Structures are given as structure tokens and as C-alpha cells.
Amino acid sequence: MLGLLVAVAIGGLWSCTSLGYVTQSLGGGAKVLLKRQPIERLLNDPQLDPELESRLRLVLEVREFAQLELQLPVGKSYRSYVELGRPYVTWNVVAAPAHSMVPKTWCFPIAGCVSYRGYFSEHRAHRFAEALREDGWDVSVGGVTAYSTLGWFADPVLDTFVDLPDLSLAGLLFHEIAHQKLYVPGDTAFNESFASHVELIGERLFSERRGEADHSTDAVALRAAAVAREREGQFIDLVLSTQTCLDRLYRSGASDEVLELGKAQEFDQLRALYGRLRAEWVAADKAGPVYDGWFDRALNNAHIAAVGDYSIWLEAFAELELRSQSLEAFYQAAADLAALDPTERKRQLEELSPARSAPTDRSEEDNNTQAACVTAPLASE
């Protein structure tokens, strides 16, 4: 029974379509769980590395905050630690058609249909990705530092993320625990956008509490975290506006030749816009840009869609929170959306975020890192 549940629960990693995939899911998930060490026991070890001790104590503080202040169902998660000795716990494969922004989905028990397929082996992930490319799909492979088993198991803290800056570590845990609060099988964009907004709420409240406690060493770190979050928002806006332009292009009815040309032009413009934004960041504080790695990879529809799933409804959830009188009311409003059929849920999310409900041109007057879509609307639209 444990093996079956591991396959079902860990990141949605189970499918009747491939025995090899089931095997790697079972084996990889079980290996992670079997390496768990109770944090309390580690903290009582006088030989524990002081830096790791500090990080684990922060985890317990964040865990308590998530339960008491964010009203999240922490359960037994994040009371244990696993050292994997690698940068990522899984690698997700995302695929999309060459001329569509709608990603390919894979369906699993419990998790429903999701727009990625996860592997505990990087080699297996790339091998599967290559097979998809040979079939004509745009494909992206990305390392994942954390995952949620949706409360089926006591998720451990991993060495893949334990060294993150304080607020980033807190936000990651808030995000993963939020999946236990609300999860809609088959709607990746809803689930990830909801969890991402809970992450934002948690970071805001957690930083406020730390500020009130007057942690003398936190002031600089909190300012840095605020800058990082602002830049993340700018990066996401760039990607989502490109996604909007590409979606409009692909729905235009133009020939494949025209679509390929427009696609290349939109990606060229995205790189150019990021270059401007990068220059602004460096001029502002000389800090190293944080999204160069994302742009170093080949840009394609899947690469864009992987960002969109985590962000496309952030405006909707921000508006939902604004309309709610309390955190409880926000959660209830989100749960009400989750209970709707997919079509109605999408319609209401679009009403909450009109900027995402229809393609809109980027305006150079509004922001010098933005520009109108390269491809103008065609007469067939």
C-alpha cells in the first residue's frame, strides 16, 4: 500500500501508461521518504553544523507561523530533514505544441491532469523530453527544489532548498503547504497561482512580524527580499505579456510560415526587453541579475507556459484578497472558485483579472521595458 500511495501522491507522479515511469516514481519517492531524519533529533545532536541548525530552527518557526497565522494545515510536514546531495529533487518536463500556448497534460489519480511530468532522475527526464521533441513538441525541462504530496505524507525539508534566504525559504514552505489547503485536480494554473498568492501573503505577514520583533540583522535582508520580489514581478510581467502576444498570434489563423516568423520575433523582443530590465537592475544596485539562466535556455512555448502556470491568475487572487474582509474570507472565496466547473471558474478568474482575459498590447509609454506585440492583429481575428 505504501508503494502505491507514494506513486499516487508524490507530485502526481503515477500513470498507468508507462511501467518504467511508475517504477521510477515509486523508487524515487520512496528513497526520499526513507531518508527522513526528525528535526528535533537533529537539533539535539551536538555535532550538528551550526548553519544547518539555524536553518532548521527557522523552518520550525515558519511552520508554526503557517499554522497559527496563515491558518494552513501543516499536519506533520516539515518536521524532518533529508539530505539528497543534489541540486534538485525532481525534474519536470513541460511540453506545448509548436503553435499553441496550451501545454500538453498528463493525467494521474488524485492529482488529476497536470501540465508537467516529473522525474526523480534527470537523465530520464531529458530522455523523455527528447522523445517529445522528435514528435514535434516544444519542450522545457526544469529542476524542482520542492514538492507537495498534498498531505498524503509528511513532506520533509530538503537540502535542495534549506539554504535559501530566510524570506525565500519561508515563502517556499507557505507555497507548498498551501497546496494542502486547496487543490483542484486537473487545474495546474489555478493551484499554482493560488499557492503563489498565499506565498506572497505569508511573506508579507512573516516579514512584518520579524520587523516588529526588531531583528537587527533582518533589515537589510528584508529590503533585499522586497527588491527580489519586485524584480520577480517584472520578470513575470514580461513573460506573461509575451505569452499573451503569442497566444493571439497562434489564434490568428495565419500560415505556419507566418506563425514561425512571428514566434521568433516575439522571442527576440522578449530577450531585448529583458536586456533593458537587466541593465536597469545592475545600474540600480550592481547586483547580479537572477534570470540570466532562464534566458540562457532555448525559448519556446513550453518554457513560457511553465512560468505562466505559476503566475497567470496572480492578479485574480490579489483582487480576491482585496475584496475579502479577512484571511478566512479569502480562503472561502478561493474554495468557492475551486468548486465551480472549469469553464465557469476560468470565466470568473478572467473577470477578476481583466488584463489576462484578453490579449492586450504592451505600451512603451507605460514602461520602457515593455513594447507592443511584434505581430499586429491579423484581419482574420
Image: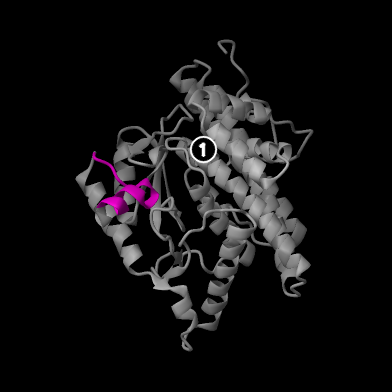
Q: Position of residue 69 (x, y in %)?
A: 65, 57
By secondary structure, the bulk of the magenta-drawn segment is best described as helix
Residue 372 appearing in the image: no
* In the rendered image, the vertical position of residue 161 relative to residue 124, given as above or below: below
Residue 62 appearing in the image: yes
Q: Where is residue 331 in the image (x, y as percent from the top left)?
A: 61, 42
Q: Name the residue under label 1.
A: 189
**Direction bottom: furthest residue:** 46
Q: Position of residue 334 (x, y in %)?
A: 59, 38
Q: In which quarter of the image is residue 272?
A: top right
- Residue at left 23%, top 52%? 23
Q: Tell me if 12 is positioned left or right of 47 in this view.
A: left
Q: Which of 127 and 149 is in front in this view?
A: 149
Q: Where is residue 164 in the image (x, y as percent from the top left)?
A: 56, 65
Quadrant including the C terminus = top right
* In the rendered image, the vertical position of residue 201 relative to residue 369, given as above or below: below
Q: Magenta stretch: give its range.
A: 4-16
Residue 40 among magenta residues: no
Q: Tell me if 111 is positioned left or right of 329 in this view.
A: left
